[in-house]
Image (tube, helix red, strand yellow):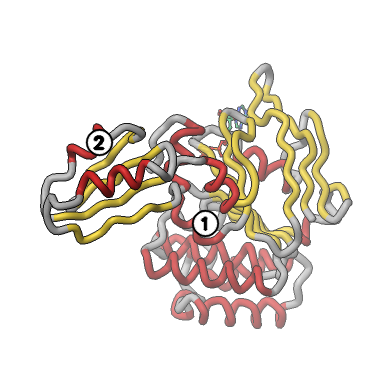
């Protein structure tokens, strides 16, 4: 289990991480969310032992993270960290050897992952000659080559096209099945909803929401009513209990303060024309994020 206990990080008088407490069990995929500058990367760097917390303690299986434990961890940094002049092969051999792997282990893992990502043709290409998305795939391979117990992925999906996003997601699921503990950050709420059971939303260094995704949604209280019809639905926004609304191409999504408001909305559309959809939905993670953090996220 990864345990983060009352961790703080000061840069001079500025507090980047302010008393974070997290417990992430083995084999879990955990999402760390937050607007730009919330403190996610600083938290990751402390987990990795690259930064020392100003206060508090971080342990992996009850041991302080140190030089000895660093081979148990894999890290995909947000910024690109590959050597542009090396070929993919040279790069992976170099990083694998740093992790104490033998050449044959490196070769086996490299072949497995390149095949999985449909990237065998890049083996002898220089990193600088690859597209941004393909470099990202190689960087992911570099992070998992030594089969770490704990995998930290900082914005793993950035720069990937939808096909490659799916490839990476399925690789993440498979690593979880094999028992890897995965902590990742993302600005894409749909990826977090799909991959994580547990998450933490950070805001200005503090945790503002934390826990099980389903419970977070349930306790948020507000729900969404999605309506699609062949007549203008904008008048529904004035119904009592509607907090906000958003029109879509062919309908409207109304945030309601409680479930019962949906019944009033249902009554309000009856006999007005042809209704194609009327659905009461859980709030999205995006709704929760916007309310807690107060900014619109990409
Ligand atoms: P993003 O989504 O933009 O990557 P983040 O949540 O990862 O943001 P961090 O990179 O952890 O945010 O930064 C948190 C805050 O700490 C920012 O205000 C940043 O400017 C500050 N910060 C980070 N590293 C340092 C440093 N070495 N010295 C001073 N301030 C720093």
Q: Residue at x 76, y 34 (%)?
A: 7
Q: Nearer the viewer, residue 112 or 227?
A: 227
Q: How many marks?
A: 2
Relative placement, left or right, of 296 versus 181 is left
Q: Dot 2 corresponds to which residue?
A: 237
Is residue 118 in view? yes
Is residue 78 in view? no
Q: Residue 92: x percent and y percent?
A: 62, 69
Density class for disc 1 (Cα within 10 Å; few <14, some 14-19, many ≥20) is many
Q: Dot 1 corresponds to which residue?
A: 156
Q: Nearer the viewer, residue 98 or 207?
A: 207
**Label 1 vs label 2: CA separation?**
38 Å
Q: Residue 164: x percent and y percent?
A: 42, 68
Q: Residue at x 51, y 54 (%)?
A: 192
In this view, 216 is above or below 72: above
The disc, 1 or 2, on the residue closer to the chain's N-terminal end is 1
Extreme-right residue of the structure: 63
Q: Residue at x 71, y 35 (%)?
A: 20
């Amino acid at each position: 289990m990864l345990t983060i206990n009352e961790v703080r990080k000061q840069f001079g008088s500025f507090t980047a991480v302010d008393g974070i407490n997290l417990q992430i069990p083995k084999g879990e995929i955990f999402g760390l969310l937050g607007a730009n500058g919330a403190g996610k990367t600083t938290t990751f760097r402390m987990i990795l032992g690259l930064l020392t917390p100003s206060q508090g303690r971080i342990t992996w299986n009850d041991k302080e993270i140190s030089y000895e434990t660093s081979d148990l961890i894999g890290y995909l940094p947000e910024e690109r960290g590959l050597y542009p002049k090396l070929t993919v092969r040279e790069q992976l051999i170099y990083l694998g050897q740093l992790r104490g792997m033998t050449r044959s282990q490196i070769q086996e893992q490299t072949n497995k992952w390149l095949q999985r990502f449909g990237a065998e043709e890049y083996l002898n290409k220089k990193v600088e000659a690859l597209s941004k998305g393909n470099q990202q795939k190689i960087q992911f391979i570099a992070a998992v080559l030594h089969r770490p117990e704990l995998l930290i992925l900082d914005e793993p999906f950035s720069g990937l096209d939808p096909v490659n996003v799916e490839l990476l997601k399925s690789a993440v699921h498979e690593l979880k099945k094999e028992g890897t503990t995965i902590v990742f950050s993302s600005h894409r709420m749909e990826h977090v909803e799909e991959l994580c059971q547990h998450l933490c939303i950070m805001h200005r260094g503090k945790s503002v929401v934390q826990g099980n995704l389903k419970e977070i949604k349930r306790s948020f209280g507000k729900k969404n009513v999605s309506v699609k019809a062949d007549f203008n639905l904008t008048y529904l926004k004035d119904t009592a209990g509607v907090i906000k609304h958003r029109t879509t191409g062919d309908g409207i999504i109304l945030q309601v303060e409680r479930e019962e408001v949906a019944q009033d909305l249902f009554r309000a559309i009856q006999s007005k024309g042809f209704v194609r959809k009327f659905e009461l939905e859980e709030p999205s993670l995006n709704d929760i994020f916007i309310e807690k953090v107060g900014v619109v996220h990409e």
